[in-house]
Amino acid sequence: MLRRLAELIWSARRTLLALAVGGLICLIGAAAIVLHKKEYGSSAALVVVGAPTVAEREFTTRTTIDPRLRSWLARYNSPTVVADIYARKYRSRDKLEALRAEGVTGRLVVATKSSVASESPDHGPVVVLTVYAPTPAAAQSQLDTVVADFEQQLVDDQQGADPSLSVTVAIASRSSAAVLVSGSRSRAAFGFVALGLICAGILFVLLGHDFRRPSLLESGS
């Protein structure tokens, strides 16, 4: 009896192995979906506004102005360049650690766009700050912290310059409420279904192979 059972198990070893592997993958996938944490995102679009040149300012005020009073950021004469500088700064480890010390524990994503209406990231004067957090309130409050820090950082970096000859930033749009990011969980569910279908296909092939091949028990009779 034990010998016949052993022969039966041996003849079906591919099927049993496929079932074991497929079951393990399905369990891991199901656990990943069930335990996946929800995220809420809140965004703000900030437009970098360039400063006038010294000549333009002198013409407007009818006074002579010391060129050294113009901000070093304004001397780039390109809001796009300034936006790129600050996008890199707010992606840096030092800045992320400083923000964490201020209570920004969520995930910060920084992008630049050519215009507020643009749907895709690109080089431009618009800096989009997005905070992802476990709750809507956390996402909103942490975004407020990041935006305030961005505005203050711009002021601090231009200390000593004439404010009228300095680069500024304006909030063009911001989320009125944090939005549930459903894509991450739905992608996990889609991946789980696709993986299950692949495992089912492999299992089907292996089962068909075993059914066409006589077992040791049948060959011995």
Image: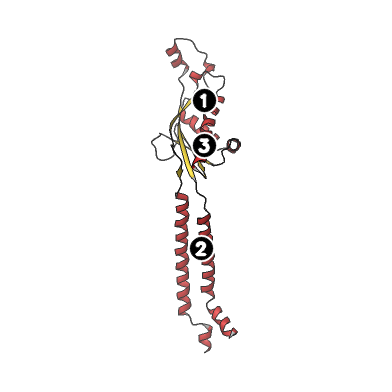
**At x 54% / y 35%, what residue is drawn?**
90
Residue linked to disc 3: 141
Label 3 sits on a secondary structure element that is: helix
Q: Is residue 51 visible?
A: yes
**At x 51% / y 63%, what residue is drawn?**
26
Q: Nearer the viewer, mark 1 or mark 2?
A: 2
| Identity, as a three-letter code, of the amino acid under mark 2 | Cys
Residue 79 x/y as whole percent:
46, 28
Residue linked to disc 2: 26
Vertical relation: 200 (above or below) 46: below
Q: Residue furthest top?
A: 63
**At x 44% / y 16%, what residue is drawn?**
56
Decide which of 78, 221 is in the foreground and name it: 221
Vertical relation: 150 (above or below) 41: above
| Identity, as a three-letter code, of the amino acid under mark 3 | Ser
Label 1 sits on a secondary structure element that is: loop
| Whole-number angstrom distance, CA of label 2 to CA of label 3 | 38 Å
Determine whether, in the image, residue 100 is placed left or right of residue 199.
right
Quarter in which the N terminus is drawn: bottom right
Marked residue nearer the N-terminal end (1 or 2): 2
Within 10 Å of disc 1 (Cα), the crowding (few <14, some 14-19, many 20+) is many
Specify the label residue 73 is tagged with: 1
Within 10 Å of disc 3 (Cα), the crowding (few <14, some 14-19, many 20+) is some
Q: Residue furthest front?
A: 137
Label 2 sits on a secondary structure element that is: helix
Marked residue nearer the N-terminal end (1 or 3): 1
Total number of numbered labels? 3
**At x 48% / y 80%, what residue is drawn?**
213
Pointers 1 and 2 in contact (C-beta within 8 Å): no
Decide which of 162, 31 is in the foreground and name it: 31
Within 10 Å of disc 2 (Cα), the crowding (few <14, some 14-19, many 20+) is some
